[in-house]
Each structure stands twice: as C-alpha cells, then as structure tokens.
Image (spheres, rainbow, N blue to C red):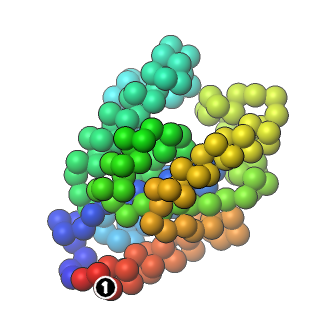
Amino acid sequence: MRNTAANRRNIVLVGPMGSGKSHVGRLLATRLGLAFVDVDARIEADAGMPIPAIFASEGEAGFRVRESRMLAGTLAQAGQVIATGGGAVLDAGNRTAMRTASKVVYLQVELQEQLRRLAGDTGRPLLDVADRAQRLAELQALREPLYREVANLLFDTAHQSPERVAEALAALIARDEEIHA
C-alpha cells in the first residue's frame, strides 16, 4: 500500500489535557506525510475567539456543540492526523464518528506528568480551579472508560519526548497498515 493521504483513513488522537495530542499530532503528521488538524484551533478560528471566551459566553455546552460540529466536518475528509480536545469523547456521536472514519490512538499520561506539562497553561477553562490535581483526576475518572472505548491503540506518553512518541506511533501505524494491506 502506498503511503499517500488519498488512500489513508484519518488518525485521531484522544486523551487528557497534557497528553501531547497537539504536539505529537504535528510531528506524527509530518512523519506520515499527512495533514495535521487541531480541532480546538479550528473551533477558535471559526468562532473568532479563544476557547476560554467561548466557555465564558456559551458555557461548556455551547463549546461541545461547536466541537461536535467541527469534528464531524474534519472527519468527513481523509488522510489527516487529528488532535481532539480532551472532552471530545464525552459525546457518543463523536465516539461513533471517530471509530468509523479513523484509527483512534489514546495518548495516556500520568497525573504528575500532566501537572508538570500544564503548569504554566492558563488557557484551559476546566482547569481554572484551586486544586488542579483533583480536577484532572476527576476528569480522568470520567473520561478514561470513554478513551478506552473509542481507541484502537493505547500509547503511554509520560516518559518519552514528543519526538520519540511520534516516531514510535508512526512505526506502529505503518506496521498495522502493512498487515491490513
């Protein structure tokens, strides 16, 4: 099978905040010769405002509507590495769409590594709380079963550089494509 975007399904990255979906996604797309799409960035561009402003004006429910619409539009095209927001799996329709149009990779990360990676990040409305560790643990407890439900592949990002994660994922995906060619 030739390694071209025209004959490849999407690769969707799911996982919690700080797991590396955007950073690894860019690197993985480059390695695989695919387009990279960050769903959150597209939502911001479409709305003309950053995600915290969307949350402030429309609430989380309004943001999730935008997220589902943007994800559906993105999944309608093939040959992309797509970084989703951490909560994209909350919607059953999103999970079905991801499984149907994509290979889904769950990027896992430990709580302490999440806290380290997100230490200076003030652009995440769901982390605008006094106890970030507690909030991240609560989100993980809610979302973990959904990440596992939708994923074709689980990959731990906690103790590797984004470059190493992208390299290893590219190799796994290439092997899988050879097997299914």
**Residue 41 sits in which quadrant?**
top left
User: Which residue is situated farthest in the top direction here?
Assistant: 57
Q: Is residue 7 left or right of residue 27?
A: left
**Image coords of residue 119 (percent x, y):** 75, 44
Q: From what the image shows, is residue 136 above or below residue 151?
A: above
Q: How many marks?
A: 1
Measuring from the top left, give residue 127's x and y in whole percent: 69, 33
Tell me where residue 100 appears, x and y as whole percent.
Answer: 30, 56
- Residue found 63% across the figure and 67% down from its top: 156
Quadrant location, the N terminus: bottom left
- Which is more toward the observer, 1 or 138? 138
Front-most of residues 102 and 48: 102
Residue sitting at 38 percent across and 24 percent down?
Answer: 47
Quadrant of the frame with the C terminus? bottom left
Q: Is residue 49 visible?
A: yes
Vertical side of 132 occupied by 12: above or below? below
The residue wearing badge 1 is 178
Direction from residue 117 to residue 144 in the image, left or right: left
Q: Nearer the viewer, residue 80 or 139?
A: 139
- Image quarter of residue 137: top right
| Residue 29: quadrant of the picture | bottom left
Mark 1 is surrounded, within 10 Å at the Cα level, by few (under 14), some (14 to 19) or many (20 or more) other residues, namely few
Taking 53 as reference, is 30 left or right?
left
Residue drawn at x 70%, y 69% as measured from the top left = 159
Residue 69 on image: x %, y %: 32, 33
Element type where label 1 sits in the image: helix
In the rendered view, would you say 75 is above or below 31?
A: above
Name which residue type carries label 1: Glu
Residue 40 shows up from this direction: no
